[in-house]
Amino acid sequence: MAVPKSALRKWEKVRAFALAMPGATEEFPWGESVAKVDKKVFVFLGVTDGGYPLGVTVKLKDEAAHAHALTCPGAEPAGYGLGKSGWVRVPLEPQGAPAAELLCDWVEESYRAIATKRRTAELDAR
């Protein structure tokens, strides 16, 4: 199944934003794209081949952001027990899916939740 162009554009913006974070790298464990900082995942970007609905999974410690993310169409606590730690999967394809700007805010929050104080200070210095 083809991925809608609007969802793919949004995904590309979010991926570029994530990889611009201090120390960020992209890896492909389990065949899906993830962004890591110092060997720790801060955003799961999934796959773009249409084999699974396009979405991003972020860790949101802020209760308001976490609650807001879960109100997005199709959003759900992340699988494999990650939801208990604040991880939320947000689909990009449904009508009413969040804008790239909001997703980038969530990616930054997820980065801050995972990154070391030194990396966070680097981000703040920008």
Image (spheres, grey):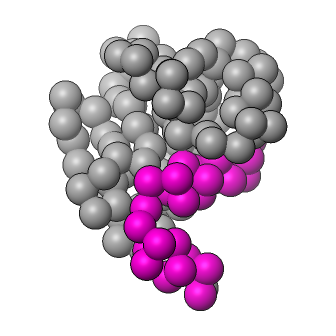
**Magenta part, dominant SS:** helix
Residue 108, placed above or below residue 48 = below
Q: Which residue is painted at 59% across and 87% down in the image?
A: 125
Image quarter for residue 126?
bottom right
Between 90 and 78, the one nearer to me in the picture? 78
Q: Which residue is painted at 24% across and 56% down in the image?
A: 39
Residue 104, placed above or below residue 5 = below
Residue 81, placed above or below residue 110 = above
Between 29 and 116, the one nearer to me in the picture? 116
Left or right of 103 on screen, residue 78: left
Image quarter for residue 29?
top left
Q: Which residue is painted at 20% across and 30% down in the image?
A: 31
Between 94 and 67, the one nearer to me in the picture? 67
**Magenta part of the protein: which range?**
99-125
Magenta stretch encompasses residue 106: yes
Visible residue check, residue 54: no
Q: Which residue is painted at 80% across and 37% down in the image?
A: 64
